[in-house]
Image (cartoon, rainbow, N blue to C red):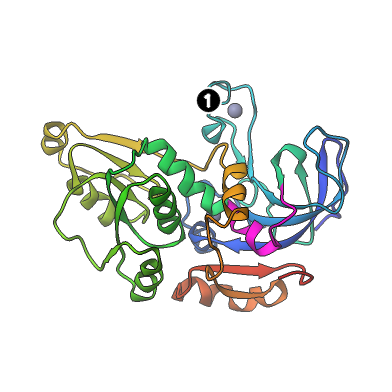
Amino acid sequence: MPPVVWQPGEALVRVHRVAICGSDWHAFEGHQANYTYPRIIGHELSCEVLEVPDNSRGIRPGDRCAVEPHLTCGVCRPCLLHRPNCCESMSVLGVHVDGGMRGLMNVPVERLYKSERLSFDQLALVEFLTIGAHAVARSGLAAGEDVLIVGAGPIGLSVLQFALTAGASARIIEKAEFRRQFAGRFGVEVLPEYDGRPASVVFDCTGDEEAITASFNRVGPAGRLVLVGQFLGFIPFDHTPFIRRELTIIASRNSHHQFPRVIGMIERGEINLDQWITCRMPLAEVPEVFAELASHKNYIKAVFEVQDSDV
Ligand SMILES: [Zn+2]
Ligand SMILES: [Zn+2]
């Protein structure tokens, strides 16, 4: 690997924590949309700033930051519409360009979000929470609305977190007992399978063909189906019931403008991340166990410690 040298306009950072999500496992297995190879993965990152040019955002050497991994062009139509999360030239750290499973890297200064109060562990969990925050924002969820979330992996749980913040009434479906138990701490109904009651808003957080197809029939009349999980392929659905109920399908990709909000919520104790990290290890041990970890998925968030100077 070539040495990392500080580039103008970018900060040189030392990565401290890399949190892992479903897309990393799928990328490792070779069947995830968007990834190009060979690739250093890692897009859920916390870091310490080593060198940084003068900037208007108050980022200085020594700051602890979360990293927004989406590098966008700023000039395409979605960017000009203030929707850079679907930029036509989107480049995501750890997906299209090398990510954080290494000691040092360069990050554009405007992609760093600092906190003087959060630990490196907490900062590494900000990115996946922004995915749920964005999905709920896309859905236009209103207080009191009836929500069904399919899948209680980290993304489903982050959607649940922000659905509850929006004042919705939520249920969540999850097949795995371990995840059902974790979801129970949110105080909502946790179901092993669909209970036959359609919801006003259904979030698919599985990316699973069968689950997504079934979700079309779990949305009540005039409802919304929000697709958060990604499936690599075509999804067939029954057209007439879809028209009859005049459903709206909403796609949700990445996140936009959510980092400061999520960091603020964690700082104020509105999001409690205490028990989310159920698997951790030093980066040096990762090559040996990564394949096994990918197969059993018996954890909520796995975090790899690139530096061990902080908890
Ligand atoms: Zn992720
Ligand atoms: Zn763009």
Residue type at mark 1: give it: Pro
Residue at 70% from the left image edge and 62% from the top image edge: 119
Q: Is mark 1 within 8 Å of ligand 2?
A: yes
Residue at 51% from the left image edge and 63% from the top image edge: 25
- Residue 37 position within the rendered picture, expressed as x and y whole percent measured from the top left: 61, 53
- Residue 294 position within the rendered picture, expressed as x and y whole percent measured from the top left: 50, 70
Residue range highlighted in magenta: 114-126
Tag 1: Cα neighbours inside 10 Å, few (<14), some, or many (≥20)? some
Instruction: Say whether residue 122 is magenta.
Output: yes
Picture quadrant of residue 245: top left
Regarding mark 1 in the picture, which secondary structure is present there?
A: helix
Frontmost residue, 189 versus 243: 189
Placement of the C terminus among the 4 image quadrants: bottom right
Residue at 33% from the left image edge and 56% from the top image edge: 208
Picture quadrant of residue 221: top left
Instruction: Say whether residue 303 is magenta.
Output: no
Q: Is residue 43 visible?
A: no
- Residue 305 position within the rendered picture, expressed as x and y whole percent measured from the top left: 70, 69
Placement of the N terminus among the 4 image quadrants: bottom right
- Most extreme residue toward the front is 268
The residue that mark 1 highlights is 78
Classify residue 17 as left or right of residue 145.
right
Classify residue 15 as left or right of residue 219.
right
- Residue 271 position within the rendered picture, expressed as x and y whole percent measured from the top left: 52, 57
